[in-house]
Image (cartoon, grey):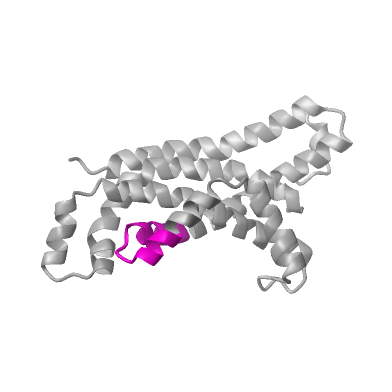
Amino acid sequence: MFDFLQGYDVLGAFWTTVQLTLLAAVGSLVWGTLLAAMRVGPVPLMRGFGTVYVNTVRNIPLTVIILFTSLGLANTLGVTLGAKGVIDTLNFRLAVLGLVAYTSAFVCEVIRSGINTVPVGQAEAARAIGLSFSQVLRLVVLPQAFRSSVGPLANVLIALTKNTTVAAAIGVAEAATLMKTMVEKEAQLIPITAVFALGFVILTLPTGLILGWVGKKVAIKR
């Protein structure tokens, strides 16, 4: 029944998808948090940068960003990200970079929404006892904001997992790339599509359920 899978490294392709997701998720969380801090910060220049970045990147298709990392950064500007000219490694790193640049804009807005749920009085009280803006953000605001943002961040992570398929545009050997190859070589479109659809369900459904449960457990009761 599954003879069409022989000779293809399906698990390896999904492992590449998992690696793309995890690395891009960590990078997006870090950069998205910094962007959120900029957007609520007291420095007008940083607020302006954060606002322009988020509003611009969210309105650019992910495919365009991924292709820009390959054609613009690598081919035109010669950016290698330490890959030493190895095509597979370079494309993988460029895909992670593009996914981080895109997803962090959505992470920023999720965290900023979480920041807005923190009562203003808490920040004012923290400043009244002499804490700086960065200390207020790090010690008082962000811990509560993250607890309020677990559920929405789970949705962003699920979307990121599915968005990794765009990496096929620059030749990264993840699940969508292998599926395209198999569809071109095998005459079993529906079974192949069903297998890869099931694979993505297996990746995303537990993530949503687990993070949804965590979000309820850590939610702040106001």
Q: Nearer the viewer, residue 70 or 178?
A: 70
| Residue occupying the point 78% across, 31% down | 2
Assess whether residue 41 is covered by the magenta stretch: yes
Where does residue 219 sit, x and y in percent of width and height?
27, 42
Work out whether residue 16 can be spotted.
Answer: no
| Residue occupying the point 17% across, 40% down | 222
| Residue occupying the point 61% across, 37% down | 200
Where does residue 15 sit, x and y in percent of width and height?
65, 50
| Residue occupying the point 18% across, 58% down | 123
Does the magenta stretch mainly form a helix, a strand or a loop? Answer: helix
Compared to 207, does 66 lie above or below? below
Is residue 213 found left or right of 52 in the rendered image? left
Determine which quarter of the picture holds residue 152: top left
Determine which quarter of the picture holds residue 98: bottom right
Is residue 172 found left or right of 149 in the rendered image? right
Is residue 57 found left or right of 75 in the rendered image? left
Work out whether residue 59 can be spotted.
Answer: yes
Q: Nearer the viewer, residue 57 or 206?
A: 57
The region drawn magenta spans 31-49
Is residue 152 found left or right of 28 in the rendered image? left
